[in-house]
Amino acid sequence: MFAHLVHSNTEAKKIMYRHIITLLLLACAAMNAVAQDVQLQPDHPDRHVVVKGDTLWDISAKFLKDPWLWPKVWKMNREQIKNPHLIYPGDVVVLDLSGGDPRLRLLRETVTLEPGIRIDALEKEAVATIAPNIIEPFLSQPLIIENDELDNAPAIVGAQENRVVLSQGVRIYIDEIQEEQGRFWNVYRTGKVFTDPVTKEVLGTEAVHLGTANITRYGAPATAEIAKANQEIFKGDKLVVAPDELSKSFVPRAPDSEIQGQILSIYGSVNEAGRNSIVSINRGSNEGMEPGHVLAIYREGNLVKNPGYQKAKDEDDKTTVPENIKLPNERVGLLMVFRTFDRISYGLIMQASEPVNALDIVQTP
C-alpha cells in the first residue's frame, strides 16, 4: 500500500514537472515571437534628425520593416497612443538596442536663452503622421451622412440679383441659421450612395463639397457670403457647420482586433490606385477603426479550372477532384486610415506593389 502511494506520488510529480516544462517552453516561444515581431530595416540608421517635411510614417519606415509597429518600439500604452507626444523638426530619434529588443527614444532640441536657462524650441509645427497636403481636403470637406441627415440641414433659398449659378463673393440667403450655430459653414450636395459589397446594405451617402460660406446676418432667413466655390453652387444646396480641425498627428498601428473589409471607391478620377491615393473602405468606427490604423491590401485570388478535373461519368462516379481551384489572395499594398465615420473610413495608400482596385480586400496586417 505504502509503495503504491509512493509510486502514485512520483507519477504525479512527473506529470506536474512535464506541465511546468511545457508552460516554460510555451512562454519562451511566446517571448521569442514577440521579439521577432519587430524587424529592423537592414540599412537602418542609428539615429535620425527630424526635418521639416518628415512624416511619422517616413521616420518609422527608416528603422522598421513594418512601420505600423511604431507603438511597440516606443513602448506606448493605450493612453499614450490616444494622446501621443508630438515630434518636431530638430528632434533626434535614436535607436536603442541596449535592452535586447529594438526601442526608439527621442532627444529633444532645446534653445539656450542665457546660462542656466533652457527651453524647448518654439514656433515649430509638429510632424504629421502622413503627408498633410494629400489628406487635408479629406479631413474637413467630404462628409459621410446617414439617415438622410442632410435633408434637415439649412438650405440656400435665394441669392443676390436672383442669380442661378452661385460663385465666390455672391451673397446668398439660407432658410434659417441662428448665431449659436456658428459663422463658418461648408456647402454640400448629396452625392454617391455607398452600399456594402457583400450585404448590399446602405452604409451612407457621401456629400459633395461645393465650397464654404460665412454668415453675415443670422435669423430666418439668414444671409451669407460664399467665401470659396470649388464647383457651381445652386439654390437648394445645403450647409453644414465647419468642423473643428482634425488632428494630423496619430500613431501608426495595427487594429487591436481582426478587421476585414473591402475598398469601396478610389478618389482622384482614376480607376486604379497607387501610393498616396485616397480610398474609402466599408469599415468604420462601429467596427473599431481609428485614425492611424494600418490595413494590408489583398487582391482576391481568381477561380481557375482544375486541369485534373473530369466530369463524373454517372451518379455512382464519386470524383474527389474539384472542378475549380481558388488561387490564394496576394498582398498588394498597405493603407492607413486617417478619418473615420460610423461605417466608412478614408485611408491613404502607403505602399503598393501593384495597382489597387475597388473591391480589393483590406485586413489587419
Image (cartoon, grey):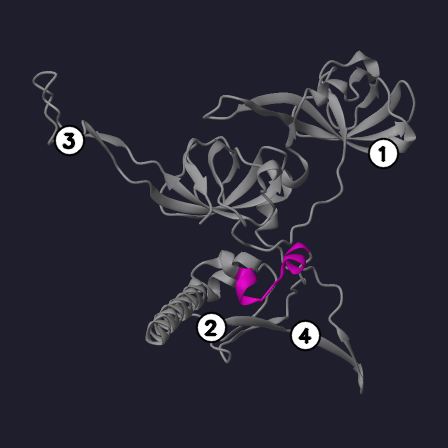
- Identify the residue under disc 3: 321
Name which residue type carries label 4. Answer: Glu
Residue lying at the far front of the rendered structure: 1
Which secondary structure, mark 4?
Answer: loop
Sequence order check, earlier mark of 4 and 2: 2
Find residue 14 and report its horizontal and vertical position in percent: 35, 72
Nearest-to-viewer mark from 3 and 4: 3
- Identify the residue under disc 1: 183
Between marks 3 and 4, how big is the CA–CA gap? Answer: 67 Å
Which secondary structure, mark 1?
Answer: loop
Between marks 3 and 2, how big is the CA–CA gap? Answer: 53 Å
Find residue 59 and report its horizontal and vertical position in percent: 53, 63
Between marks 4 and 2, how big is the CA–CA gap? Answer: 19 Å
Q: Which quarter of the image is occupied by the N terminus?
A: bottom left
Q: Is residue 111 above or below residue 140?
A: below
Magenta stretch: includes residue 72: yes
Find residue 326 and report its horizontal and vertical position in percent: 26, 34
Q: Residues within 10 Å of mark 3 (few under 14, many from 20)?
A: few
Say which residue appears at 12% left-offset and 16% top-offset: 315
Q: Which residues are magenta?
A: 70-82
Name which residue type carries label 3. Answer: Val
Q: Residues within 10 Å of mark 1 (few under 14, many from 20)?
A: some
- Identify the residue under disc 2: 45
Between marks 1 and 2, how big is the CA–CA gap? Answer: 49 Å
Which secondary structure, mark 3?
Answer: loop
Sequence order check, earlier mark of 3 and 2: 2
Name which residue type carries label 1. Answer: Arg
